Image (spheres, rainbow, N blue to C red):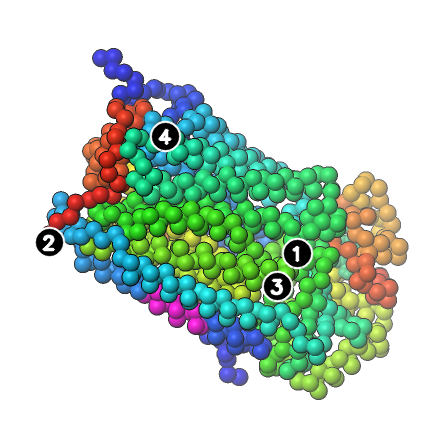
C-alpha cells in the first residue's frame, strides 16, 4: 500500500494544482514549459496568420500600416523570445537531461523552477505591454526608432530583459548538471548527442545573453533619462546598438538551432537503429560552432555603414561556421546508410528537418557572400532564410522530439496515421510559405512591407496559401497528441527500441526520482547490434 | 525592350548587376548540386534500407570513413573560400567610387527621399545620366532608413547624424524603383521613389530646367510652395485638402489657433509655421505624435516662404 513516493510515477507522486506550481521536479517543469511554449507558439502563429492575410493584396486591406507593424513586431518578439529560444531546452531539455544522464534531477532544482517563473513573468509583461499601446519596433529594437518612448516598446524591452535571465539560469543549470550529475560509467563520449547539444547551448546562453541584457538596459535608460548612447540626436551611435544586439543575436541563432541538432541526432539514431556517423565530430562541432559563433555577428551589418575591413573579416569568419554545419548534414545522411529505417511520425520530422535545414544552411551561405548580400540584405530572402532555420529546422525538430518523447512523458502512444498525415501537411505548408518568399526576396522585395509592388503579389498569395496548409498540419499534429492523452494506447517502457537511458532504464512514465536504482552505464548511447540481410 | 529579369533576380541596370548575378548564379548551381546530392541520398537510403520486420536490425554500423570525412570537409572548405574571394572582390569594387563620379546628396526621412543636386536644387526622384558613375552621399534626419535600388543591386543604410555612401553606374536608360529597406515606422513601405536614367543630353537639359525651376523661375510663391510640398516629402504626412494623415492637414491652417500638447495654444502665423518646420518638437500640435523630422539646415528660407504662401491658399 504505502509505496514509497519516489517509486510511483511523477504524475501521481503528488496531486493538485499547487503541487505543480511549487514543484522542483524537472519533468513537471519541462511539461509546464512545453505547455507554455506551445501556447505562445499558437499566439505567435495567429499574429503571423493575420498579417499574412493582409498581405494577400498589395493595397491596404483590413488592417492599417500601424497595425501591421504591431503584428509583425508581436510575432517576432513572441516567436524569438518566448518560443524558439527557450523552446527545446526549456521543454525537452528540462525533461530529458537528467533522464539521459542517469541523474535524479538537475543540479539546481529550485533554480530550475525560478527559470520557469522568470519565463512566466517575462511573458506576462510582454502581454501587459498590449494594454500600454502598440509595440512596433520589430523584434530587433533598432535605435533610434525604438527610442521613441512608446510605452509598449518599453514594456517589451523589460520583458525581453527578464526572459534573458530565465535563459541564463537554464544554461547555467544544464552546464553544471552535465559536469556533475552523470551516472557512474556515463563518460563524456557516452553521452547522447542531445546532451552535448544542450551543453553547447548552455555555454552560449551563459555568455551571450548578458550582452542582450545590457543592451536592453541601455535602451531603457536612454528612453527614460535621454542620455545619449544609441541616438545620434543625443550624441549616441546607432551602430553601437546593432553591434551589441547582434553580439547576442548571432549566437542566439545557435541557441535556437543547436538543440535541434541534438534532437535530430536522437531521432535518426533510433529510427535507423544506427550509431551516429561521426559522433565525436557532431559533439565537438556543436561546441566549436558555439565559439566561432561569437565572432561573426558583423555579418548582419554589411550595409549598416561599418567599415569595409570589418565587413570583410566578418564575411571570412562566417564561412567557417558553414563548414561544420555542412559536415553535420553529411553525417546524418550517412548515418542512414545500412540502417533499419522506419518512417514513424518523429522520423518524418527528422527527415523534414534535414530537407529544411539544408535549404536554411545553403541560403545562409549565399548571404555571407559580400557582394551578393548587399542585394539580398533586408529582403524577404533573409526572412525566408531564417524561417528555414528557426521554424523549418528548430520547430520541426522540436515537434519531432515532442512526438518521440511523448510516450515517455505521458505514458500514451499517439495515432501514427494522423501523426504522419500531419507531418506531411506541415512539410508542404511550410515549404509553400517560405519558398515563395525566397524568390520574391531575391527579386528585391523588402521585408516588413505593408504595401508592396504588384509584381510580388503572386508570391505573397502562395505564401499566404502555404500558411493555411501549415496551420492545418500543426493543429492536426497538436490534436493528435491531445486526443492520445485520453484514447491512446498505454505506452510500453521502450516503444521505439532506443538505447539511451530514458528508454532503457526509466519506467514509462518515469518515477518521481527517475530511476528506482542508479543506472550504471557500460556502453555508448547508440550501440545497436547488426544482422546479416 | 528585352528584359534581363530572371526567375530569381530582377532586371539589371548597373555595372554591378552582372557580377552580382554571376556570383549568385554560380552559387545557385553549387547549392543545387549539394541539395540534390543530399536529398537524393536520403531518399535512396530511406527506400533501400526500409525496415521490413519490426525486429530487424541495421545491416552495418559504419561510423567512420576517413576518405569520406576528409573529402566532405576539404571540398566545402575550398568552395566557401572561393565564394569568400568572389564576394570580397565584388564588394570592394562596390564600395570604392571612381574618381570621376558625380556626387548627389540623398536625404531620407519619414517617409520620403529627397535628392539634393550640387546645382542647388532638390528633387523627389533621382535623375542620373547613363554610363556615368554616380556617388550618393546618404543621410537621414530622423531614424534609420536604407536606400535600395534592386535593378542596380545597390543598397546602403541611411543613418541619422552620419554620412554613408554608395555608388553605381547605370547601364541603360529607364525608370527603376527605389525602396527603403530599413524598417522606419508607419509608412516604411510607402517610402518609395524612382531613379530615372537619361541619355547624357537629355540629362543636361533636365538639369538646366530643374535648376531654373528651383529658383522659382516663372512660378508664383504659392505655386513654388506646392512643388516644395511634394519635393520635400511633406505630402507623406500632410494633406492639402482636409484628409486626415500622420500630421495635421494644411487646409484651413493659416491664421487658426493651434492647441499644443503642452496645454498652451498659439496662432498659426509666419513665425509659428517657420518654427514648426525647422524645429517641430518645440511645438507639438495636440493629438499628434512628435514624429515630424526637423528640417533645420535642409530647407531654404525661400522654400519656407513659398510653403507659407502655399498654406495661405489652402482655405
Ligand atoms: Cu548571424
Ligand atoms: Cu523604411
Q: Is residue B193 above or below residue A339?
A: below
Question: Is residue A408 in view from this perspective?
Answer: no
Classify mark 4: helix, strand or loop: loop
Q: Residue A120 at x, y = what percent?
A: 49, 32
Q: Residue A480 at x, y = what percent?
A: 29, 41
**Among the 4 quarters of the image, the one containing residue B17:** bottom right
Q: Which mark is residue B144?
A: 1
Q: Are marks 1 and 2 in contact (CB under 8 Å)?
A: no
Q: Which mark is residue A4?
A: none
Which residue appears farthest toward the left when viewing the image?
A533
Front residue of A516 and B114? A516
Residue A300 inside the magenta-drawn segment: no
Classify mark 2: helix, strand or loop: loop
To which residue does mark 2 refer?
A: A533
Q: Main secondary structure of the magenta part?
A: helix
Q: Residues within 10 Å of mark 1 (few under 14, many from 20)?
A: many
Q: Is mark 1 within 8 Å of ligand 2?
A: yes
Front residue of A313 and B276? A313
Q: Is residue A443 above or below residue B12?
A: above
| Quadrant where the N terminus of chain A is found in the figure | top left
To which residue does mark 4 refer?
A: A181
Which stretch is magenta?
B25-36
Classify mark 1: helix, strand or loop: loop
Q: Residue A71 at x, y = what percent?
A: 54, 48
To which residue does mark 3 refer?
A: A308
Amino acid at each position: 500500500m504505502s509505496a514509497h513516493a519516489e517509486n510511483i510515477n511523477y504524475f501521481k507522486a503528488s496531486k493538485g494544482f499547487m503541487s505543480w506550481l511549487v514543484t522542483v521536479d524537472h519533468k513537471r517543469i519541462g511539461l509546464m514549459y512545453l505547455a507554455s511554449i506551445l501556447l505562445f507558439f499558437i499566439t505567435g502563429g495567429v499574429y503571423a496568420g493575420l498579417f499574412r492575410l493582409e498581405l494577400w493584396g498589395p493595397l491596404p486591406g483590413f488592417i492599417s500600416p500601424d497595425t501591421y507593424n504591431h503584428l509583425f513586431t508581436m510575432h517576432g518578439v513572441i516567436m524569438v523570445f518566448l518560443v524558439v529560444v527557450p523552446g527545446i531546452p526549456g521543454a525537452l531539455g528540462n525533461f530529458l537531461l537528467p533522464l539521459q544522464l542517469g541523474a535524479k534531477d538537475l543540479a539546481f532544482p529550485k533554480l530550475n523552477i525560478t527559470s520557469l517563473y522568470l519565463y512566466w513573468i517575462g511573458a506576462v509583461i510582454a502581454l501587459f505591454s498590449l494594454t500600454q499601446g502598440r509595440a512596433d519596433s520589430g523584434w530587433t529594437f533598432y535605435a533610434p526608432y525604438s527610442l521613441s518612448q512608446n510605452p509598449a516598446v518599453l514594456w517589451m524591452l523589460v520583458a525581453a530583459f527578464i526572459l534573458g535571465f530565465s535563459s541564463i539560469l537554464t544554461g547555467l543549470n544544464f552546464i553544471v548538471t552535465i559536469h556533475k550529475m552523470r551516472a557512474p560509467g556515463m563518460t563524456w563520449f557516452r553521452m547522447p548527442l542531445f546532451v552535448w547539444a544542450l551543453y553547447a547551448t548552455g555555454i552560449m546562453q551563459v555568455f551571450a545573453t548578458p550582452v542582450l541584457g545590457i543592451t536592453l538596459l541601455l535602451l531603457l535608460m536612454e528612453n527614460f533619462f535621454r542620455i545619449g548612447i544609441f541616438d545620434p540626436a543625443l550624441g549616441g551611435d546607432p551602430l553601437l546598438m546593432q553591434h551589441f544586439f547582434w553580439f547576442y543575436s548571432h549566437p542566439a541563432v545557435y541557441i535556437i538551432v543547436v538543440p535541434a541538432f541534438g534532437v535530430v541526432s536522437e531521432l535518426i539514431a533510433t529510427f535507423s537503429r544506427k550509431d551516429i556517423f561521426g559522433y565525436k565530430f557532431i559533439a565537438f562541432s556543436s561546441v566549436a560552432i558555439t565559439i566561432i559563433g561569437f565572432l561573426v555577428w558583423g555579418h548582419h551589418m554589411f550595409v549598416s555603414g561599418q567599415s569595409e575591413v570589418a565587413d570583410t573579416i566578418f564575411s571570412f569568419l562566417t564561412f567557417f561556421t558553414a563548414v561544420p554545419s555542412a559536415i553535420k548534414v553529411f553525417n546524418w545522411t550517412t548515418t542512414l546508410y545500412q540502417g533499419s529505417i522506419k518512417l514513424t511520425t518523429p522520423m518524418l520530422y527528422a527527415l523534414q528537418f534535414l530537407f529544411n535545414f539544408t535549404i536554411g544552411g545553403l541560403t545562409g551561405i549565399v548571404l555571407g557572400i559580400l557582394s551578393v548580400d548587399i542585394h539580398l540584405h533586408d529582403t524577404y530572402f533573409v526572412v525566408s532564410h531564417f524561417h528555414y532555420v528557426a521554424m523549418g529546422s528548430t520547430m520541426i525538430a522540436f515537434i519531432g522530439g515532442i512526438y518521440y518523447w511523448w510516450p515517455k512523458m505521458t505514458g500514451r502512444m499517439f495515432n501514427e496515421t494522423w501523426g504522419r498525415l500531419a507531418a506531411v501537411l506541415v512539410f508542404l505548408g511550410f515549404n509553400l510559405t517560405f519558398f515563395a518568399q525566397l524568390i520574391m526576396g531575391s527579386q528585391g522585395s523588402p521585408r516588413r512591407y505593408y504595401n508592396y509592388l504588384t509584381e510580388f503579389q503572386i508570391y505573397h498569395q502562395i505564401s499566404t496559401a502555404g500558411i493555411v496548409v501549415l496551420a492545418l498540419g500543426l493543429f492536426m499534429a497538436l490534436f493528435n497528441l491531445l486526443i492520445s492523452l485520453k484514447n491512446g494506447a498505454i505506452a510500453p517502457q521502450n516503444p521505439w527500441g532506443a538505447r539511451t537511458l530514458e528508454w532503457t532504464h526509466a519506467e514509462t512514465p518515469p518515477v518521481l526520482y527517475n530511476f528506482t536504482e542508479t543506472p550504471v552505464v557500460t556502453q555508448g548511447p547508440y550501440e545497436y547490434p547488426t544482422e546479416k540481410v | 525592350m528585352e528584359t534581363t529579369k530572371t526567375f530569381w533576380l530582377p532586371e539589371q541596370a548597373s555595372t554591378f548587376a552582372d557580377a552580382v548575378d554571376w556570383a549568385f548564379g554560380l552559387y545557385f548551381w553549387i547549392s543545387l548540386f549539394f541539395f540534390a546530392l543530399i536529398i537524393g541520398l536520403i531518399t535512396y537510403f530511406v527506400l533501400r534500407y526500409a525496415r521490413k520486420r519490426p525486429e530487424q536490425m541495421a545491416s552495418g554500423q559504419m561510423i567512420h570513413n576517413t576518405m569520406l570525412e576528409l573529402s566532405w570537409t576539404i571540398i566545402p572548405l575550398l568552395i566557401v573560400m572561393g565564394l569568400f574571394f568572389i564576394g570580397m572582390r565584388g564588394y570592394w569594387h562596390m564600395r570604392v567610387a571612381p574618381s570621376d563620379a558625380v556626387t548627389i546628396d540623398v536625404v531620407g526621412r519619414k517617409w520620403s527621399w529627397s535628392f539634393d543636386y550640387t546645382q542647388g536644387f532638390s528633387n523627389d526622384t533621382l535623375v542620373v545620366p547613363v554610363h556615368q558613375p554616380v556617388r550618393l552621399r546618404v543621410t537621414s534626419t530622423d531614424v534609420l532608413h536604407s536606400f535600395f535600388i534592386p535593378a542596380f543591386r545597390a543598397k546602403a543604410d541611411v543613418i541619422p547624424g552620419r554620412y554613408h555612401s554608395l555608388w553605381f553606374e547605370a547601364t541603360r536608360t529607364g525608370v527603376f524603383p527605389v525602396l527603403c529597406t530599413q524598417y522606419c515606422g508607419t509608412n516604411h513601405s510607402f517610402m518609395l521613389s524612382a531613379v530615372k536614367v537619361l541619355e547624357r543630353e537629355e540629362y543636361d537639359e533636365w538639369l538646366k530646367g530643374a535648376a531654373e525651376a528651383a529658383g522659382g523661375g516663372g512660378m508664383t510663391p504659392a505655386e513654388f510652395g506646392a512643388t516644395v510640398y511634394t519635393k520635400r516629402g511633406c505630402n507623406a504626412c500632410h494633406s492639402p485638402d482636409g484628409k486626415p494623415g500622420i500630421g495635421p492637414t494644411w487646409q484651413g491652417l493659416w491664421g487658426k489657433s493651434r492647441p499644443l500638447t503642452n496645454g498652451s495654444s498659439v496662432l498659426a502665423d509666419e513665425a509659428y509655421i517657420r518654427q514648426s518646420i525647422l524645429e517641430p518638437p518645440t511645438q507639438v500640435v495636440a493629438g499628434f505624435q512628435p514624429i515630424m523630422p526637423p528640417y533645420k539646415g535642409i530647407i531654404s528660407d525661400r522654400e519656407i516662404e513659398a510653403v507659407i504662401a502655399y498654406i495661405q491658399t489652402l482655405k
